[in-house]
Image (cartoon, rainbow, N blue to C red):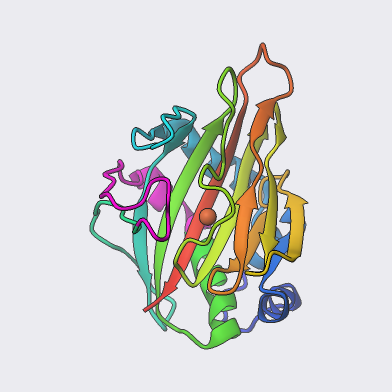
Amino acid sequence: MNDNATPTADARAAVDALATTGACVLPSGTFSRILDATAEDWTRFGRNWEDLLLDEYMADGGRYRYRRYGQYDLDPQGSLTLLPHEPYRQESRINRLNGGVDRVFEPLTDHFTHDPLLTRILVRLGRIFSAVDGTDRWNIKLHPYRIVAGREVGQPAPEGRHQDGVTFITTLLINRVNVTGGESSAFTPEGDELVRGTLSAPGDLFLGDDRTIFHDVTPIHPVDPQEAAHRDVLVIAYTAR
Ligand SMILES: [Fe+2]
């Protein structure tokens, strides 16, 4: 396992893309090399998405999102500390749909926080972001989401094109089952498109500098309306401390 702090060529390419464009999509093969992750790692980690709970705070009345929530501190030595569980809050100027209220979600499970792949994801993404702007201490907020599509349209980004009020934002695809749509995109504040792509394989990753770009995801629909359909992602938000 590559656990020294020297960035690999794959990690350096992500740093360059973030520093120049402000956003990029890493295919699963590239991100898996950065993580030393195997197909078995993604399958095992993905089982945690069977254990999410309905988000009852959707101001659009939607019942299509299942989730948990937790946060970590990542220190300059690369040590991760799971922080005490707290309500999640975004201000309304950041999240016009769901901001302005404390949202109390169920915490991450022990099974989730103890998965060895999670540590590698958080530490190695932290190194990439530190290499972009020199920050070496991060607050990391984790949002495992399942968006279901059926009679109701599944909205991965119900607030529309937005920023999250953090430093770097990522969406890691965990699984897509019987789903079409869910295309990710990133834009300059003036509306020029920077990146567009559909995360499709477990380990495909969208990364963006949330200070300089806006991002969006299109709705999802079932391919076969008779069958269950869902898109599982891990949204990870890094904020400089
Ligand atoms: Fe977002």
Extreme residue in the front direction:
190
- Does 58 sit left or right of 88 as displayed? right
Answer with the quarter of the image where residue 177 lies: top right
Examine the rendered structure and indicate whether residue 175 appears above or below residue 63. below
Residue 189: within the magenta?
Answer: no
Q: Nearer the viewer, residue 4 or 193?
A: 193
User: Magenta span: helix, strand or loop, mainly?
Assistant: loop
Q: Nearer the viewer, residue 117 or 133?
A: 133
Answer with the quarter of the image where residue 125 lies: bottom right
What span is in magenta? 92-118
Q: Is residue 30 visible?
A: no
Q: Position of residue 149 (x, y in %)?
A: 59, 26
Which residue does the image show at 74% across and 23% down from the upper left? 223
Extreme residue in the top direction:
226
Q: Quadrant of the C terminus?
A: bottom left
Which residue does the image show at 23% across and 58% down from the upper left? 84
Which residue does the image show at 42% across and 34% down from the upper left? 52
